[in-house]
Image: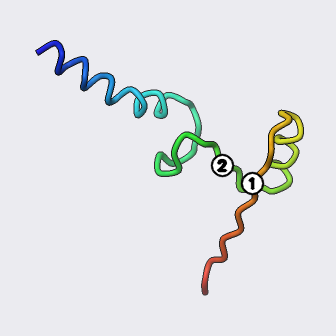
Amino acid sequence: MSRMLLTLVLAALPFLTAACAGTDQPVELGRVNFSRSVDEGLARAGRESKPAFVLFQEVPG
């Protein structure tokens, strides 16, 4: 019984930590914090010395 409980807790851990991250980001986007502003994202990438990946997705209609 205790082994099954431990397995369930370990399986739920990523979901619990993502929920407690304090972001307004939908869970569907995962653990990566996406920005919707290109200027803010590039500025943050520069401050943190990280690369920036810009994805443009056209919305039809």
Query: Of residues 7 and 37, which is closer to you in this image?
Result: 7
Query: Of residues 20 and 49, which is closer to you in this image?
Result: 49
Q: Earlier in the sequence, mark 1 or mark 2?
A: 2
Q: Nearer the viewer, mark 1 or mark 2?
A: 1
Q: Residue at 55%, 30% (x, y): give it.
A: 21
Dot 1: element? loop
Name which quarter of the figure residue 14 lies in.
top left
Could you tell whether 59 is left or right of 1 in the image? right
Q: Position of residue 29 (x, y in %)?
A: 53, 50
Name which quarter of the figure residue 43 lies in.
top right
Tell me if mark 2 has few (under 14), some (14-19) or many (20+) residues whose alpha carbon lies within 10 angstroms of its own: few
Q: Position of residue 17 (x, y in %)?
A: 47, 27
Q: Quadrant of the N terminus?
A: top left
Q: Say what amino acid the circle numbered 1 marks.
A: Phe
Q: Quadrant of the C terminus?
A: bottom right
Q: Is residue 30 above or below residue 20?
A: below
Q: Residue at 66%, 76% (x, y): give it.
A: 58
Q: Is residue 57 above or below residue 22?
A: below
Could you tell whether 13 is left or right of 33 in the image? left
Q: Which residue is mark 1?
A: 53
Q: Position of residue 3 (x, y in %)?
A: 18, 16
Q: Which residue is mark 2?
A: 34
Q: Say what amino acid the circle numbered 2 marks.
A: Phe
Q: CA distance from mark 1 to mark 2?
A: 10 Å
Q: Residue at 47%, 46% (x, y): give it.
A: 27
**Residue farthest to the left, as pictured:** 1
**Residue farthest to the bottom, as pictured:** 61
Q: Residue at 83%, 42% (x, y): give it.
A: 45
